[in-house]
Amino acid sequence: MKQWYAFFFILFCFSTQAQQHTTVDFKHIQANITPDFTTKTITGTLTLDFEILKNTDSIYLDAKNITDFKIQLKNAENQPKTVKNSAKFDKNHLIIYSDFTAGKHYSATLNYSAKPSQALYFVNNEGQNQLWTQGQGKYTSNWLPSIDAMNDKIEFDLTVIAPAGKTVISNGKLTKKEQKSDETVWYFDMQKPMSSYLVALAIGNYDKKEITSASGVPISLYYYPEKAYYAEPTYRHTKQIFDFFEQEIGYAYPWQNYKEVPVKDFLYAGMENTTATLFSDTFMVDSTGFDDRNYVNVNAHELAHQWFGDLVTETSSTHHWLQEGFATYYALLAEKQVFGDDYFYWQLYQTAEQLKELSDRGKGEKLLNGGASSLTFYQKGAWALHILREQIGDESFRMAVTAYLQEHQFDNVESDDFIAAAEEASGQDLSAFKANWLEQSAFQADAALESLKKSEFIRNYLELSALRKIALSEKAEALEKVLTLPNDYLGQEAVHQLADAPLDESIPLYKMAIASGNRWVRQAVATSMQEVPAALKIDYEILLDDDSYVTREAALLALWVSFPQDREAYLKKMEGVTGFSDKNIETLWLALSLATPAYKPQSKQQRYKQLLEYTYMRYPFQVRENAFKYLYQLQLYEKQSLKNLVLGCVHFNWRFAQSCRQILDMLLKETMWSNALRDLQLGDQKAQDYLNKKLN
């Protein structure tokens, strides 16, 4: 009998929860949040305003990790009622029981404590305590009781109590700050509703640069005070992109302001929280790093989401391309303004190749497939918009996008909503387009190729790539022509076609490529050679001075491998060069110097300690990842770095954890290392459990 009752209760709750948006409409959540960096917990007070749409005896908030709570409900007559005994926390929801009447407005106050297991992260590395959130897809309820469903849009206003000296960033406008002893209270106001996955909070040590869009929107660009020189190259072109979007989209930026905030150990490249994009601080670069690995694409992509995703939000994952496809396409349009037409068509070509390859293997996916891959939602979605624009024309496309946003602003949408707007604007029947690009699994490669061929650059590239299987002696003149004042992409293709050619024929062309002065062509030379021919040595050594961290890293490794007699000279030249924020050149240099016995033997132990130091949690995971990789290659792990590796296996950043797990698996295959791992006492139960499981 208890089993049947439990089944009925679960079924009842599931039905109630699935249909709640038709029962209650949450209008406003005012949240007062206090994080504790020591205990990694949250305490908060929420004031909820909502309207009952149907008579019901219960409503709920999505909530996880709650350790304590108290709720006071005010009914339609504004009479307070403490309902803790009439409320329940079932590990996923706070359920409030009362006699709720349709058409009535209610308010409630929730006091709670939580210890988040995800979605809100406390990070301490490089001497900084940070806190940041990541709510997509339905994770905000891990630290802020709310409504996970994207279809329930709520106005969120956050008040945050943080340690004095820290900067707090959240959604909306900062209306005031109050200093209280060793704490500061920050008040944020949002004027429009949004889905809960877009609620954001970041706390850290920041300075900011303030700029203003052509339309007057305040834009705050945050950076670490000790790395102020990263600010300009990182945020280069931001105003240009913002102004372009407002003009191109035809709908004014819909929020009060815009903020961009770098954070440590972030899970993704960036996240488009309403008015407050958070992004991985690995995109913070100096002027040398800008051309190698800049923030422009992520910058434009997350900004485009402020319209496509934040202003209009998908009803379900079936229509996810309306967010990611649009953001990808508009980011490409912005990059076209910054980097030119060739860049735009090159990116389209690259993604078309990926989509065609997937489709040719029978792995193609419909855009209207809620379980599709990122490649489908992002890149196939962008291609669908590119083809649609060509089909209906620029003017009709812009009219369709503007009308679509105006009609569905601050609401949820399906694909047919956009198709209807495009049909209305163009006067065309788009059923064939919908069938081919939204409902068809196969990628429309022929249509994509015809579109690409409208670019003279792509036509030239296709002609050049057709020479790949031809002997160098038969195409040398054509490649030489390409390498004379080369186009970035054609020049790279020419270099890659030299790979398997006889050296006596390819060396003159390699020399031309290096002498071209084109950073991308020279980078292609550096990254395509694992060993450098003696006849190219003097020319190739110039690449150690290139204005590119990618080129210099590849050149150092290739020269060190190819010319053992000159290793000390190469190491001396590159000593003190850091590279990107992941210390790509420095960590490679440390590894190569340790593998060169004759290089400064008196400081070898110091260099070894530095490489070991980079495995600790106090460094960004990208630095740790490099250190773990080189220690494995050198077979120089010791007790503490093994501990740090296992701790990395349970890190919250799953990409980093996966990298650590792969190295651990390789170590466990070797008796010496598996024995050493068996003796470890980690002091972290989650990591110890993971290691014990692997050992057993």
Image: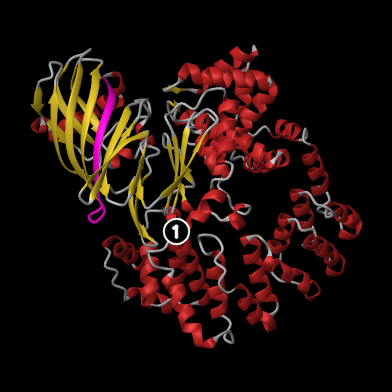
- Rendering colour mode: secondary structure
Identify which residue, 144 or 16, lies in the foreground.
Answer: 144
Q: What residue does disc 1 label? A: 226
Instruction: Judge whether residue 396 can be spotted in this image.
Output: yes
Q: Describe the element under mark 1 as helix, strand or loop.
A: helix
Q: What quarter of the picture does the C terminus occupy?
A: bottom left
Vertical comparison of 426 with 192: above or below: above
Residue at left offset 64%, top offset 34%: 443
Identify which residue, 127 or 476, lies in the foreground.
Answer: 127
Residue 398 image offset from top left, x and y in percent: 61, 21
Residue 160 image offset from top left, x and y in percent: 27, 41
Identify which residue, 671 or 270, lies in the foreground.
Answer: 270
Instruction: Judge whether residue 416 can be spotted in this image.
Output: no
Residue at left offset 28%, top offset 33%: 146
Which amino acid type is shown beneath numbered disc 1?
Glu
Quarter of the image holding residue 384? top right
Quarter of the image holding residue 250? top right
Residue at left offset 66%, top offset 19%: 395
The residue range painted magenta reads: 24-40
